[in-house]
């Protein structure tokens, strides 16, 4: 057996409900994934009817709860399906059931798709956003907000150009709420904290996968919730975007994929010189099954 350096990639071929049982308790810092949406990708993943979606996902989320560190975060990219002319409630039902499982539903981010496909429906407009649900095991978790700060932009320069006397002191709320602001505090600031709406175009490159998301999406959350050397898990690896971005950013990562073609595609994206075959027990897993791990 050879030595290896971090970061590494563990790629597993199989059903994540089974493979997750091989991952050690409290060993993952971030879970970022987009499972098959209800009744979609039938040719690839078989499809899960919206009425059965919660029942299908709960054994998976139970395993994810076990492998996630107490200070870790689970980000779930998911979207409600329209069924018989109305939005199905399986996402809402999933949130409520996961809360009973012990998860804290800490936050909800919106991914605004800047280049969504055009279309027309008789009773609604085209979808241009998706949910990213943040779950945690406890109220205190690792979060590195400074890593995702954004430039203040032209609005700050124009707004701060001519400050009034009111702007130079704490301006109390006009509605008597007790909250106020001091605009002059922004004079020396070049960056601000972002909102929970993320504006990104959908993936345009051909990744030979029917539902690849843009690289900037997992990159943003990896920056926000992990540091170098942490471990990122995607139990529905697909085209491997999350795993490859995590590796590029100096994180260890685990990918699980049930479709052999996608598994091989991701494996082949790792340079041959980076593949080392391990048969012994490894840092993230308990079994002695063969897996491929990447090294620098």
Image (spheres, helix red, strand yellow):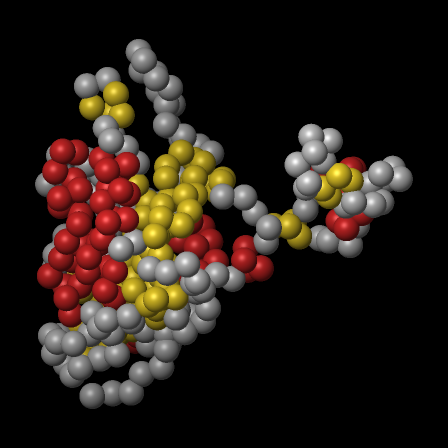
Pick whichever, 177 or 107, lies toward us.
177
Quadrant occupied by the N terminus: bottom left
Q: Give the residue displayed 20% in from the left and 70% down from the top.
A: 23
Quadrant of res 157: top right
Residue 33 screen position, x and y as percent = 30, 52
In this rendering, would 103 be left or right of 41? right
Q: Give the residue displayed 17% in from the left and 50% down from the top.
A: 58
Residue 162 is at least partly visible in this image: no
* Residue at the far top in the pictured view: 122
Residue 2 screen position, x and y as percent = 25, 87
Pick whichever, 16 or 183, lies toward us.
183
Vertical side of 144 occupied by 78: above or below = above
Q: Give the residue displayed 23% in from the left and 28% down from the top.
A: 88
Residue 182 screen position, x and y as percent = 77, 45
Pick whichever, 89 or 272, lies toward us.
89
Quadrant of res 91: top left
Quadrant occupied by the C terminus: bottom left
Q: How many marks?
A: 0
Residue 259 screen position, x and y as percent = 14, 52
In this rendering, would 52 be left or right of 275? left
Residue 295 is at least partly visible in this image: yes
Vertical side of 229 occupied by 181: above or below = above
In this rendering, would 19 be left or right of 95? left
Q: Give the residue displayed 34% in from the left and 17% down from the top.
A: 124
């Amino acid at each position: 057996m050879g030595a290896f350096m971090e970061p590494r990639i563990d790629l597993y071929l199989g059903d994540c409900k089974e493979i997750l049982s091989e991952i050690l308790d409290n060993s993952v810092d971030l879970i970022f994934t987009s499972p098959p949406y209800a009744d979609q990708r039938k040719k690839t993943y078989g499809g899960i009817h919206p009425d059965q979606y919660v029942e299908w996902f709960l054994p998976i989320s139970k395993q994810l709860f076990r492998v996630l560190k107490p200070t870790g975060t689970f980000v779930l990219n998911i979207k409600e399906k329209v069924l018989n002319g109305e939005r199905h409630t399986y996402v809402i039902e999933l949130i409520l059931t996961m809360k009973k499982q012990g998860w804290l539903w800490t936050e909800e981010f919106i991914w605004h798709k800047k280049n969504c496909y055009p279309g027309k429906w008789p009773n609604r407009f085209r979808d241009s956003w998706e949910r990213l649900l943040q779950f945690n095991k406890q109220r205190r978790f690792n979060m590195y907000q400074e890593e995702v700060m954004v430039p203040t932009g032209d609005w700050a320069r124009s707004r701060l150009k001519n400050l009034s006397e009111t702007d130079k002191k704490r301006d109390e709320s006009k509605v008597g709420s007790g909250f106020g602001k001091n605009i002059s505090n922004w004079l020396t600031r070049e960056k601000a904290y972002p909102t929970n709406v993320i504006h990104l175009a959908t993936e345009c490159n051909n990744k030979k996968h029917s539902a690849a998301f843009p690289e900037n999406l997992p990159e943003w959350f990896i920056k926000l919730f992990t540091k170098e050397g942490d471990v990122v898990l995607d139990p529905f690896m697909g085209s491997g975007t999350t795993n490859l971005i995590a590796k590029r950013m100096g994180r260890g990562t685990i990918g699980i994929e049930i479709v052999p073609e996608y598994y091989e595609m991701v494996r082949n994206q790792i340079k041959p010189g980076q593949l080392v075959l391990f048969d012994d027990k490894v840092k993230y897993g308990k079994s002695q099954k063969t897996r491929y791990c990447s090294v620098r």
